[in-house]
Image: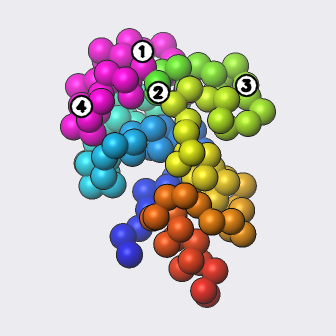
Amino acid sequence: MERLIQEDYLDSPWKMTVICILLNQTTNQQVRKILDSLFDLIQSPEKCSGLNPDQIYPVIKGTGFGNVKSRRIISMSQKWIDGFKDVQELPGVGKYAKESWEIFVNGKTNFTPSDKKLRMYLEGLNSL
């Protein structure tokens, strides 16, 4: 099975959350192609929150819904800075990002995610 992108960002929950927003309605391959360029531009929540969506859009447009995702990434970064108790308070965070957070940030592996790839990941982990 292809390695999940989230596994490469275990040391950065904020970047993993950005990735989950990008993965909406697209593939790992599309997102992987733009991550270096994107994270060169948005190195931190603080740097990202000060950008205009028009600055992010050209980098992420290949993932689809670039205008929406650009705004969500900036909004999520601002809320990240402001603070949150539950990841689902962050703009752009839906079920997939919440389940990814549970697995990769909280280390929870004893549930059945709704996403097929997350389920396969946990099944692989739990069979070790």
The CA distance from mark 3 to mark 2 is: 15 Å
What type is the residue that disc 4 sits on?
Answer: Lys
Say whether disc 2 or disc 4 marks the residue closer to the N-terminus: 4
Q: Which residue is tagged 2?
A: 73
Magenta highlight on residue 55: yes
Residue in front for this viewpoint, 43 or 99: 99
State the mark number for residue 51: 1
Q: Is residue 86 left or right of residue 14?
A: right
Say whether disc 1 or disc 4 marks the residue closer to the N-terminus: 1
- Magenta extent: 45-71
Q: Nearer the viewer, mark 1 or mark 3?
A: 3
The CA distance from mark 1 to mark 4 is: 16 Å
Whether label 3 touches label 4, CB < 8 Å = no
Whether label 2 touches label 4, CB < 8 Å = no
Q: Is residue 70 left or right of residue 18?
A: left
What residue lies at 44% left-to-right and 43% top-to-bottom?
Answer: 19
Q: Secondary structure at mark 2?
A: helix
What residue lies at 58% left-to-right and 72% top-to-bottom?
Answer: 122
x then y, percent, for residue 113? 59, 61
What type is the residue that disc 1 sits on?
Answer: Leu
State the mark number for residue 83: 3
The CA distance from mark 1 to mark 3 is: 19 Å
State the mark number for residue 61: 4
Q: Specify the quadrant that holds the C terminus.
A: bottom right
Q: Splitting the image into 4 quarters, where does residue 67 fall?
A: top left
x then y, percent, for residue 2? 36, 70
Q: Specify the quadrant that holds the N terminus.
A: bottom left
